[in-house]
Amino acid sequence: LASEGARFVTAIAPAPWTLPSHITMLTGRHPAAHGVNNTDRRLADEIPTLAEVLRGQGYATAGFVAGPYLRRDYGYDRGFDLYDESLVADGRASHRGTTSPQLVANLSSWLAGEREAEQPKPFFAFLHIWDVHYDFAPPPPFDTLFDPSYEGEVDGRNIGFLKSSMSERDLEHVVALYDGEIRFSDRELGVLFEKLRAWGLWDNTIVVLTADHGEEFFEHGKIGHLMHIFDEAIQVPLIVRYPPAIDAGLVLEEQVRLMDIAPTILGLAGIESSRLGMPPEAPVREKDLSPWLRGDFLAGSIPDLVAFPENYGGGRVGVRMNQGKLIRHNEDYYELYNVRPELGERERETGKAPEVIAVLAELIQQEAEWNEWKKDGAIVAPSMTLSDPLREQLEALGYIER
């Protein structure tokens, strides 16, 4: 896919977990602007979604999901003609099974119906592949594809209970299972892409592939996500393919953000991103990247700042720029990291070194601007009561206590 489109080398999620990252992806708003930063918050009705904008422009819209943080409880279904959460709606622990083939089949069935309509519309489809999330239990042959000789007892389930003291060999196997999930998901996406080709839709469809977060494997003492804002948890793939506008094999090194996806899709479709409704006075705004994808590299600068609000579980805030990342652990302790990939965020300045102070000023300014903006009447995410099925699913994943 990347060889036929554009690949962003440094795409950064605004949070190390599913809920705020997906709301950002589908609204173009930073988590501090949409406010869905905890399990019991839902998207405010006043905030437009990408699906609402596209449906208003005559698009048929559908979403297909299998993860509990993608349930319509959180407001995701707004703007979708069909929002299929059948694989997660009944409270089943969907992370225990395999869901990608059914998701792809459901989306394909919907697309086939749209093609047979008397007057077919352009379409927007949102597909949330869930199998790559833990548990890491890919089906055969993907369970042994990357580690066929393993004979230990670790099986990739309940990884939140694994300890950093586990053997290096067992950890290698967990990573191999994760890679197997990725390869399995890749195969299922290939099935969908082949259908698009067969239907003659492939070369006139904007295809965006990305993720909401990554995973840590004890590089910084933890496994999984949620707790840290190191790059293992927040740097994600981002590939955009659209032959009418994007040259094959384009590689963009600049740091970009998940909040830029929605306006970029609108830009490629010829729709003003202002329809997403972000107030112009917001401290951090979305950016339509379509000019750069079209090859207009003189179209101004790409914002290189991602701010991380205090996140669920971790309690850390920070900023990431092209040249470095600052993480504030508490009021008196900071760490500044060089984010060059070869360093793996292992070289740091701590405390109140001059380098820390310089970037700290940016963080303090960001927090002050956000707090002032929110006091002036920014939209607040309403609270919600977790339904029993949703609570059971989040408990099974270890996200909330039983």
Image (cartoon, rainbow, N blue to C red):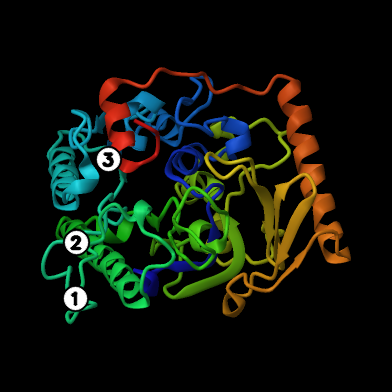
Location of mark 3 (residue): 65
Pick the residue in front: 299 or 151. Answer: 151
In the rendered structure, which amino acid carries the disc numbered 1? Answer: Leu
Location of mark 1 (residue): 145
229 left or right, relative to 222: right
In the rendered structure, which amino acid carries the disc numbered 2? Answer: Pro
Q: Is residue 60 visible?
A: no
Q: Give the image location of residue 136, x and y in percent.
A: 26, 59
Pick the residue in front: 25 or 1. Answer: 25
Q: Which mark is residue 138?
A: 2
Q: Nearer the viewer, mark 3 or mark 1?
A: 1
Relative to 98, say whether 147 is above or below.
Answer: below
**Can you say which quadrant of the picture contains the C terminus?**
top left
**In the image, farthest residue toward the right:** 354
**In contact (CB < 8 Å): disc 2 and disc 1:** yes
Nearest to N terminus: mark 2 or mark 3: 3
**In contact (CB < 8 Å): disc 2 and disc 3:** no
Q: How much space separates mark 2 and mark 1, taking CA atoms?
A: 10 Å
Nearest to N terminus: mark 2 or mark 1: 2
